[in-house]
Image (cartoon, helix red, strand yellow):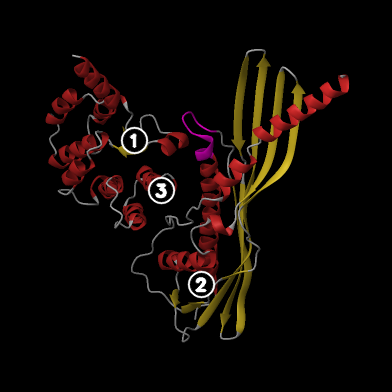
Amino acid sequence: MKNRFYVLLFVLVAAAVVACSPYRQLMTDFADGQNSLSYLHTSTKRLNMPKNPNVKLLTPVISARLGSGDVKRISTQVMPLIVFNSCEYRYECVLGRNQISEDVPQFLASSLREETGRSGTFKIKEDSAADFSIDVEIDSISARGPYQASREWIVAIIFLIHHKEDQAGPGRAFCSYHYRLRKGNEIVLDGFVKSEKTIEMLRPQRRTSFSDFRGFYRANLVESLSETIKMNNEKLVRKINQYFRDNPT
Amino acid sequence: MKSFVFCCWITVCVSCVPSAYKLTTLQDVPTESDLRRKKFILLNSRDFENGGRLAAIVNGKKWLDFDQEVSHVKDQKAKVFLQGTKLMVQKDYAGALNQFKSLKASDFDCQVKILVTDCLYELKRDTTNFRRNYQEALDCTTNAFVREMALKRYRFFKYEK
């Protein structure tokens, strides 16, 4: 009889833990939507500046693995105390290609072209007659962060008190490019630019549904990734400017 | 009688809904969190002598006081700008757009460009290139707060549709 009671209790707690798990909902809310990488350029716009030499931008490639958006289970902690019960779920949210509305290499090409138009001392040209060529390879790109959900409920004979709390972050976005500037076939500049951005901890505000909050977390990760691309583009243009300053053509 | 009370109740409720737009003179510098929640409009001391009072009136939706205060403003452009911002707070974006037509995009630290784009966004004019408009406003202004305004507006457009 006693054994049956414990089995029943175990089944009840296990059922409650599974029923309260926000995994499926998190997967839907976080992994299914899309956000844009586009940003406003804040670099100083150089007006009426002669731009020389011409540089051909080869189509950027991405060698880093950027798979589909995913939510990974990290841990589940259960505290079954019959009257007071609590569960804490920890996940890792990973941003993927399907959550970004642009094609990343194409976006890099267009944003780098625009950045060059603003702050570059050289000119991006599409034809093969350009004196120089640059190829950019995204060798590392990622945006991810933890997501934590806690569920508590108190069972008191005729009523049940239920409490939910979610928090996300601090997330981290990282992006690195490997670039090579060539004059003809000779590599004249070879290096990396890297940027990182950390996202502060987020909690749902009043009147924000958990579903909106998870979508907002995804948007924050995309926004941070966009920020790292912006920083990399600015750094890259500065490095090429510096090269042409040191090696006038 | 019942329907009258109901209508009054609805009117009170609608008028209590907080506006998305808020006027500031930067006396109390908005925090990052404020900037993410509200769309600010700057009344700088160079263009508006009584900016603090005007901001308080518009944010408090005291429209009778507003008309009285605006009548003291001498500059015609400032009057039009204030009328436009009032209409934006009242969510009459078509009316605001009409007001801003008589101003140049570069007026008031290029805020007119931002506010016109805001109105088009609120009116859901999908043919507008919002990114280009906010970028132009950002490049046009030299005021650090207005630059921040343009960046945050684009953020609203991008992530909070």
* Circle 2: element type: helix
Relative side of A126 to B72, left or right: right
> Which residue is located at x 52 percent, y 39 percent?
A211
Q: Amino acid at mark 2?
A: Arg
Question: Which numbered dot is residue B20?
Answer: 1
Residue with the mark numbered 3: B151
x, y percent for residue A91: 68, 42
x, y percent for residue B9: 26, 19
* Circle 3: element type: helix
The quadrant holding residue A201 is: top right
> Which residue is located at x 60 percent, y 78 percent?
A188
Total numbered circles: 3
Mark 2 burial class by Cα count in 10 Å: few <14, some 14-19, many 20+: few
Residue with the mark numbered 2: A245
Mark 3 burial class by Cα count in 10 Å: few <14, some 14-19, many 20+: many
Q: Earlier in the sequence, mark 1 or mark 3?
A: 1
Segment colored magenta? A204-213
The quadrant holding residue B30 is: top left
